[in-house]
Amino acid sequence: MSAAPLTALPLDELRQRSSTKWRRYPEKVLPLFVAETDFAPAPAITRALMRAVELGDTGYTPPDPGIARAFAGFAQRRFGWAVDPERVRTTCDVMMGVVEILRRVIAPGDRVIVTPPVYPPFYECIPEAGGVVERVPLLEKETGWELDLLGIEAAFAGGARSVLLCNPHNPTGTAHSRESLAALADLAAGFGATVISDEIHAPLVHAPHTFTPFLTASPAAARIGFAVTSASKAYNLAGLKCALMVTAAEPSGAVVRSLPDEVEWRTGLFGAIAGVAAFSEESDVWLDGLLAALDQNRRLLAELLAEHVPDARYRIPEAGFLAWVDLTGLGWGENPAVKIRREADVALHLGPLFGEEGSGHVRINIGCSPDVLREAVARIGSLISS
């Protein structure tokens, strides 16, 4: 039996939140930009955090807060992935984990491959780790977005030493296939390179698509790969600061174990507490309800754009709550989100921040109520006839 969709909180309640989504712009603006969702937390998370506050459990994060075992259980239930809790370490957030691993697997000046359009912090964390960004854009085919394996091979042949992979991909919502991930792993292994896979959107893959953890794609992937993930996107916990660095082989495990203790000390205790509750079996029904709500909205957006913005190009995402929309046909310039915010009071993420491929595009957060989505797209459509 499919889960009932979650219902988003009402706007007057959401506007009492103090997070970036609700404080960045004036109240008249509908915020569909940053990746925060509009649902009440999973009940198990609320109970765990309330109990921690009641106890004054606000000290330092212990060496073993239980989240490695909780994640291993979640990965087995949801993905059929056998994670060894001994091969999991925590840190503050996914990008911090990426930077710390990169510092161990590349030398200063080494090139690191990204696959744009891609999450904007990728372009910042690679230089922070001493690397140089090497762009190999995704290929858009009739059937969806794909890794450009020939382009990646050429980049490796030219000296690139690592790939920073987004799996599932933000902003396109692509759930990379096992075959493409295995091919990527083979390429990396052949050139003595590594792959760091950001898997923060993994819990949010929509049926009939499935999530393939990079480390399970092939024996080569297990050897040369690192996964960095968190409960923060699926369960809206970004402010609590807890991410997981996962490995599946001894050499990569040794890299993560070699990281300074301070990397793990940066883990937020509330993030670990909330993560344990999120990854517990008790929260699975909530997650299924979230997926049902997002499934409705990703399809609703297609209908709304066809009605109000017929020149928009939108491919229904396979994963996540972020929609990548091409507005080039409207003639609103390389950064249409600016016009939309100023003239329609709808805040969308700026397409060019995702790379050159984002010119003329916007990213829309559909993790909201259907009514908010309807109002936002209607406002955008009003600019066409005005």
Image (spheres, rainbow, N blue to C red):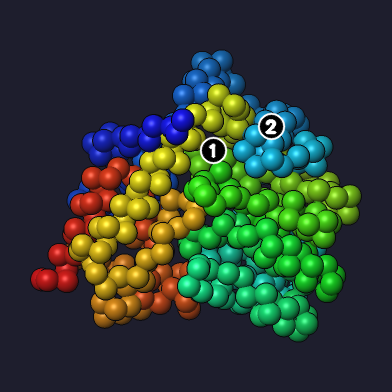
Q: In this view, does 343 lie to the left or right of 57?
A: left
Residue 248 drawn above or below residue 164: above
Q: What element carries label 2?
A: helix
Q: Which amino acid does label 2 sit on?
A: Gly
The one of 6 and 275 positioned closer to us in this rendering: 6
Q: In the rendered image, which quarter contains the C terminus?
A: bottom left
Residue 273 horizontal/vertical position (percent) = 60, 28
Residue that label 2 marks: 73
* Residue found at x 48% / y 62%: 171
Residue 36 horizontal/vertical position (percent) = 42, 46
- Judge the density around disc 1: few (<14), some (14-19), many (≥20) Cα neighbours within 10 Å: some
The one of 318 and 245 positioned closer to us in this rendering: 318
Q: Residue furthest left?
A: 386
* Residue found at x 49% / y 55%: 318
Visible in this render: residue 71?
A: no
The label shown at residue 55 is none
- Which quadrant would residue 134 be assigned to in this image? bottom right
Instruction: For marks 2 and 1, give the CA distance.
Output: 21 Å
Residue that label 1 marks: 240
Residue 225 drawn above or below residue 372: below
Residue 320 horizontal/vertical position (percent) = 48, 51
Q: What residue type is labelled 1?
A: Leu
Q: Which of marks 2 and 1 is nearer the N terminus?
A: 2
* Residue found at x 71% / y 42%: 81
Residue 136 horizontal/vertical position (percent) = 61, 77
Visible in this render: residue 249?
A: yes
